[in-house]
Amino acid sequence: MPIIQFKDQNIHCDKQQILLDELLAAGCSVPFSCRAGLCHSCLMYATAGTPPKAAQQGLNQEQLQKNGFLACQCHPDADLVVRLPNRQHDAMPAIITSVTALNQVVKQVQISPSRLIDYHPGQQIKLTHHGHERTYTLVSHPEQDQELIIHVQRIAGGNISQWLCESASPGDTITLCDVQGDCYYQSKNPHSPLVLIAAEVGLGAMLGVIQDALWHQHRGPIHLIHHVPSVADLYLQDSLRELCHHNQQLSYHTVVGSWTKDSLPQLTYLQQSHFFFAGATPRIMEYWTTLQQFNIPLSQCSVISFGLEEVSNQAVDNLDLSF
């Protein structure tokens, strides 16, 4: 039975069990979300031993060189010493400079950090206020925006989201740390087609990726799909149409209501595209299921999956995520 060393614990791991489950059962604090190898929330690195190849599907070259693997896909067949990724842990104070309503449940929040932050649009940053913390995706662009911008959807029972949407005002102080995530534009092939699918407030993350692609002068077609439960949940439509008008390679359309296989446009370049997803984990799984029907490999996908870690279990049970 393989022995997995994580921090100061030695865990005897059954080969038939998933490493993530074994770590959680042992009381280890390991982030996770989709459990399908899509969101990369449970990314870990082996500092001794070799992780199974099956647990490395979808990782980039840098992660592979560091012996990275996904704990939710790992059935260890030998002893491993593992660690979590090193993040930018230096916490810094910041000030909220504006809170603007984008629709009935989504607010745009602008934040002025106390020092410059190195990040890519689409990466995530942890926000802390009065002992509560929540990770949000950066919509802003470091070369174009002086302040950080995030989009926040109010969630019943969510301490941070409710405060930001209902009570926060310019001048309020927060703490920022932990820039992380690998779902952002990478200009390896500026002519490749990009397809971005956003569920509700995930539009902000995808808008950040699009703006970065355009800033890097991406030449291939870019197609944005915004999936929402109702017309009232749409936002930034005029701004997106204006962006399309000035960038001919960019197209945009909406899907209102249930997601089906037919929700994905009949794009001639589907098989050659790189896909970006952003939204709550159940939505991400719907989109991935659709792509599997078209035989799209995981290596062609980048994912930002919004978990519900700030919400109590009872509140999660009461949430209606179907639409």
Image: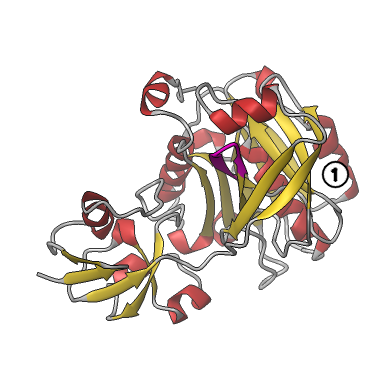
Vertical position of residue 68 compared to residue 252: above or below: below
Q: Residue 37, how many percent across, how many down?
A: 38, 55
Residue 133 quadrant:
top right
Residue 316 quadrant:
top left
Residue 274 quadrant:
bottom right
The span picked out in magenta is: 128-135
Query: For mark 1, what is the residue?
Result: 243
Q: Residue furthest front?
A: 130
Q: Residue 112, how many percent across, how many down?
A: 80, 48
Kindly state the secondary structure of the residue where label 1 is placed: helix
Front-most of residues 130 and 22:
130
Give the amino acid at mark 1: Leu
Front-most of residues 131 and 126:
131
Q: Residue 18, how many percent across, how many down?
A: 22, 57
Front-most of residues 68 and 54:
68
Q: Residue at x 59, y 36 (%)?
A: 130
Vertical position of residue 212 compared to residue 235: above or below: below
Q: Relative to residue 155, is residue 175 drawn left or right? A: right
Identify the main secondary structure in magenta: strand
Vertical position of residue 32 compared to residue 319: above or below: below
Q: Residue at x 21, y 55 (%)?
A: 22
Let me know if residue 268 appears in the view. no
Vertical position of residue 131 compared to residue 185: above or below: above
Q: Is residue 49 magenta?
A: no
